[in-house]
């Protein structure tokens, strides 16, 4: 089955700086890569996703890039703000979406230092 | 529109006791899932369902059972709770976009402690 590795496990950046979280996946057939954000004590929520036919996608201060050849994808957050502090999960899904849902990475705890 | 609702939010059990977590969704989603979240382990799939009356095992199914008697409800049961089942449990439901992407909506979570 699919295996998703996520790094780093903890990332601390100064407010206003950029943050990058990286994930690799094992199944070359995976074609859908979402990112979920989980604030402390809250539920995970989808913030951005990308399909394998697209190399990059942006939504205001966040962007995701995908390198199919290397089988890795990254989340980029620019001009970080205190409300960006959370745990971020990457995930991968095989063709057809997979009735068994998504394979998640272990998460990155992003800390925004004032 | 409540989305995905889990009950109870908190529960403390003694080893060997049984309990059921209830998940209800009002979005008419076909797929429903139960995940557990442990520190440093991310979200691990326990069981899932692709429709009313169907269930299947996920990555960590041992010690759990599930039922989907109605489309809107997905129940997770622990027949004989063990301390290793202390965790936060998340239910999720999903729809399939035209593109094939599987978008999950999560419940608020249920924190279970087994003593």
Image (spheres, coloured by chain):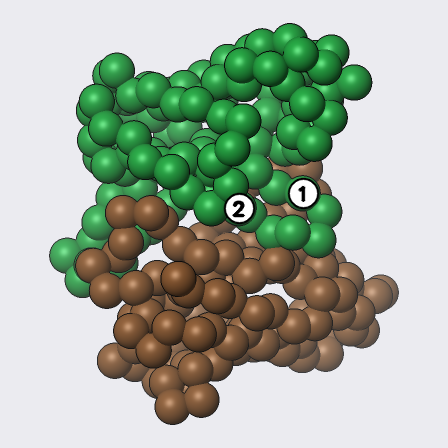
Chain colours: A brown, B green
Front position in the image: A59 or B65: B65
Q: Which residue is mark 2?
A: B44
Give the vertical position of A60 relative to A100 (above or below). Answer: below
Whether A5 is drawn above or below B21: the answer is below
Numbered disc 1: secondary structure: strand
Instruction: Residue at 71% x, 53% y: name it.
Output: B40
Q: Quadrant of residue A55?
A: bottom left
> Disc 2: which chain?
B
User: Which residue occupies the foreground of this view, A69 or A59?
Assistant: A69
Name the residue furthest right.
Answer: A114
| Residue A6, position as x, y percentages in the image | 60, 69
Q: Nearer the viewer, residue A70 or B82?
A: B82
Name which residue lies at 64% across and 9% down: B17
**In the rendered view, would you say A70 is above or below A60?**
below
**Which of the numbered marks, if any, corresponds to residue B38?**
1
Instruction: Report crowding for label 1: few under 14, some 14 to 19, many 20 or more residues within 10 A (C-alpha).
Output: some
B9 lies left or right of B46: right
Question: What's the chain of the residue with tag 1?
Answer: B
Residue B86 picture quarter: top right
- Give me the residue at 29% from left, 73% from top: A29
Q: Quadrant of residue A58?
A: bottom left
Q: Are marks 2 and 1 in contact (CB under 8 Å)?
A: yes
Instruction: Answer few, some or many: residues within 10 Å of disc 2's Cα (few below 14, many 20 plus, some between 14 and 19).
Output: many
The answer to whether residue A74 of the structure is visible from this angle is yes
Quadrant location, the N terminus of chain B? top left
């Amino acid at each position: 089955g699919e295996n998703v590795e996520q790094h780093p496990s903890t990332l601390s950046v100064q407010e206003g700086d950029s943050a990058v979280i990286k994930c690799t996946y094992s199944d070359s057939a995976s074609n859908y890569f979402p990112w979920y954000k989980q604030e402390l004590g809250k539920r995970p929520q989808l913030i951005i996703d990308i399909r394998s036919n697209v190399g990059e996608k942006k939504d205001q201060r966040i962007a995701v890039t995908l390198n199919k050849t290397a089988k890795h994808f990254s989340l980029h957050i620019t001009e970080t703000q205190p409300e960006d502090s959370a745990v971020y999960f990457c995930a991968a899904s095989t063709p057809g979406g997979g009735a068994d849902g998504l394979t998640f990475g272990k998460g990155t705890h992003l800390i925004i230092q004032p | 529109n409540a989305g995905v609702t889990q009950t109870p939010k908190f529960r403390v059990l003694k080893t060997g006791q049984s309990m059921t977590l209830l998940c209800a969704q009002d979005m008419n989603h076909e797929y429903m899932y139960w995940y557990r979240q442990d520190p440093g382990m991310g979200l691990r799939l326990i069981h899932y369902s692709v429709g009313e009356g169907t269930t299947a095992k996920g990555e960590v199914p041992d010690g759990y059972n599930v039922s989907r008697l109605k489309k809107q409800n997905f129940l997770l049961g622990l027949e004989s709770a063990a301390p290793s089942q202390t965790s936060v449990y998340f239910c999720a439901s999903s729809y399939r976009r035209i593109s094939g992407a599987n978008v999950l909506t999560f419940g608020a979570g249920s924190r279970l402690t087994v003593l």
